[in-house]
Amino acid sequence: AQKITQTQPGMFVQEKEAVTLDCTYDTSDPSYGLFWYKQPSSGEMIFLIYQGSYDQQNATEGRYSLNFQKARKSANLVISASQLGDSAMYFCAMREGQGQNFVFGPGTRLSVLP
Amino acid sequence: EAGVAQSPRYKIIEKRQSVAFWCNPISGHATLYWYQQILGQGPKLLIQFQNNGVVDDSQLPKDRFSAERLKGVDSTLKIQPAKLEDSAVYLCASSLVTGRDGYTFGSGTRLTVV
């Protein structure tokens, strides 16, 4: 069974608008962390934002925020005021318990239109 | 702080040949990971080192893949003999501690097996 599901293979957004990238996850461990990474065409994975399973508030990092709905097991990434440089692949990932291994989703390709 | 260094950046080999990739993690990062990312998919963990010991290599195809981390710093990943399905980007990542920190990834090595 897929632990991380990203149902949007590709998304388009107009520059300066907000966009939401979906992520749902599956785990029975009460302690876990959710991460979002950006992968531009250069290939490296860039850490964006983290949400812990016990965190009371949704995480925010600059233009990135995470819409964490624990009961629904969803951790959607919201990018506000999209910029052309935001065009990239975006991966949702989960780390369970005390483990150090990430499980990544299949990714969403975001294209920002001028 | 210098990032995670990987080389080569690109490699093209014929099937049944051997190939090696090199990774130098961020100084002081005890944990090092090798991921395989097939085109259109999220990264998949191949092997995880803690210092120079293997923590998890359950998804490493041990009949053809090998990895080592000498002195708990640099690491090499080898494929021998290569198959067509090994064509992928091989990402190295390192981390300091488990928790809120994401990994720091290198730019990857893009391997094409023809």
Image (cartoon, coloured by chain):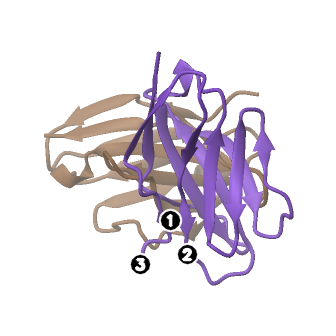
Name the residue tied to disc 2: A26
Q: Nearer the viewer, residue A39 or B98?
A: A39
Q: Residues within 10 Å of mark 1 (few under 14, many from 20)?
A: many
Under circle 3, the secondary element is loop
Q: Looking at the image, which residue is at 73% across and 52% down?
A: A50
Picture coordinates of residue A4, whole percent (x, y): 50, 65
Under circle 1, the secondary element is strand
Q: Which mark is residue A1?
A: 3
- Residue B106 in sight from this viewpoint: yes
Separation of marks 3 and 1 at Cα, in angstroms: 9 Å
Separation of marks 3 and 2 at Cα, in angstroms: 9 Å
**Colour of chain B as rendered:** brown
Would residue A12 appear left or right of B95 to someone viewing this image? left
Above or below residue B25? Residue A42 is above
Picture coordinates of residue B111, whole percent (x, y): 30, 39
Disc 2 marks a residue whose amino acid type is Asp
Q: Give the residue at the far bottom of this rendering.
A: A28
Q: Residues within 10 Å of mark 3 (few under 14, many from 20)?
A: few
Q: Say if mark 3 contacts mark 2, CB within 8 Å.
A: yes
Chain of the residue under the numbered disc 3 shown in the image: A
Between disc 2 and disc 1, whose residue precedes? 1
Q: Say if mark 2 contacts mark 1, CB within 8 Å.
A: yes
Above or below residue B30? Residue B56 is below
Q: Residues within 10 Å of mark 2 (few under 14, many from 20)?
A: some
Disc 1 marks a residue whose amino acid type is Ile
Chain of the residue under the numbered disc 1 shown in the image: A
Disc 3 marks a residue whose amino acid type is Ala
Name the residue tied to disc 1: A4
Q: Nearer the viewer, residue B94 or A63?
A: A63
In which quadrant of the rendered image does the N terminus of chain A lie? Answer: bottom left
Separation of marks 2 and 1 at Cα, in angstroms: 7 Å
- Labels 2 and 1 share a subunit: yes
